[in-house]
Image (cartoon, rainbow, N blue to C red):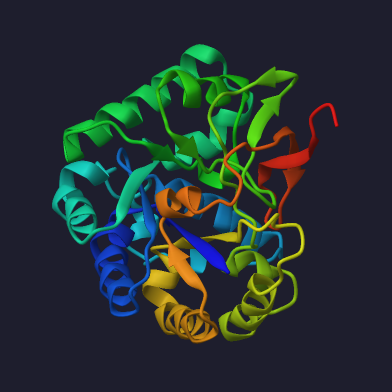
Amino acid sequence: MNIGLRVEVHTTVGTRQGVPTLVRLLGQYEAGATFLFSFGPDGSGRQLRRYLFRRMLGREVDPLLQCYSKRALLHGWLLPTSEIAKRCADVMRSARDAGFEVGIHAYDRTRWLEHAAKADGAWTRQEMTRAQAAFRDVFGEAANVRGAPGWCMNRNAFRLTQLLGFGYASDTRGVEAFVPVYQAELIACPQLPTSLPTLDEVMRLGNGSAEAAADVLLARSADTADTAGGGHVYTLRAEMEGMRHVHVFERMLQTWKARGDKLLCLADYFDALPHKNLRRHEVGIQSLPGGLQAAQQQAEFLL
């Protein structure tokens, strides 16, 4: 089984602490991965306000947000907003220099999550071009891959994956690589969708501990149904699998390696697809555990 590893990096702390930990751990197990970075303001504090509100209402606690450090959760609220790329460019480059693929998560991740679903073309272009410019400032070249925060997309975001020259993107949830058709418009930028649930999603669905959630994920990742021979894409977070639950993720790596699975960056995962003539699939919106409205692969277009 081929498993593409898609690593989201949300915060300054996640970049400084989680990324080096994952670089060392993935290197130890000879695993490939794609690191998707946030470059602009660290707006974690805005997420803290929503977290406190949910606590007051007696709702579930976000397992991912619990992994953020107390200091990280004050950025952009009680502490000044820090520009992640300005403080952590050397760490970002160290992931690339260690042989890992690097790409774009967002310029301002929290801002994207708050506004992208209903944003117009001008707003979307500004956010995506700022992210591309920030990537170029850090790495000296244009990014070839991006993965949207929360898999949150709009019509213009899909168009811009094509217009900004990305070779492929991972902005969606689904079961296999595909060419997206959004609201009857063909987008000439292939999507490598996240096909496995995330660790925090499984924890929310009744598997309360990270260890139990990892068992569910390992079983799911062995399932070849609906993968069309392409394998799976798993999304992990520097703040979660690279920090609080690093030992859980190491057990996942050990199990995958023992089974003979190939752990790949998205570029190698894309290259290894058995069929390069990808099918066209419609894209819709689906609610995920935790309330995210994610772009979701749907039926084959004009089947």
Is 2 rendered above or below residue 34?
below
Q: Quadrant of the N terminus?
A: bottom right
Does the image show residue 76?
A: no
Residue at 52% x, 74% y is: 261
Residue at 75% x, 44% y is: 286
Q: Give the x, y percent position of residue 178.
A: 64, 39
Q: Give the x, y percent position of residue 188.
A: 56, 24
Q: Give the x, y percent position of residue 33.
A: 39, 60
Q: Quadrant of the C terminus?
A: top right
Q: Quadrant of residue 145?
A: top left
Q: Quadrant of residue 137?
A: top left
Q: Give the x, y percent position of residue 123.
A: 48, 18
Is 17 rendered above or below residue 12?
below
Q: In this view, does 196 lie to the left or right of 35?
A: right
Q: In this view, does 91 lie to the left or right of 272?
A: left
Residue at 66% x, 58% y is: 229
Does the image show residue 274?
A: yes
Toward the viewer: 102 or 276? Answer: 276
Determine the residue located farthest toward the left in the rendered image.
Answer: 90
Residue at 51% x, 44% y is: 149
Question: For the image shown, how many numbered marks are present on the structure?
Answer: 0
Toward the viewer: 211 or 143? Answer: 143
Q: In this view, does 127 lie to the left or right of 214?
A: left
Determine the residue located farthest toward the top in the rendered image.
Answer: 122
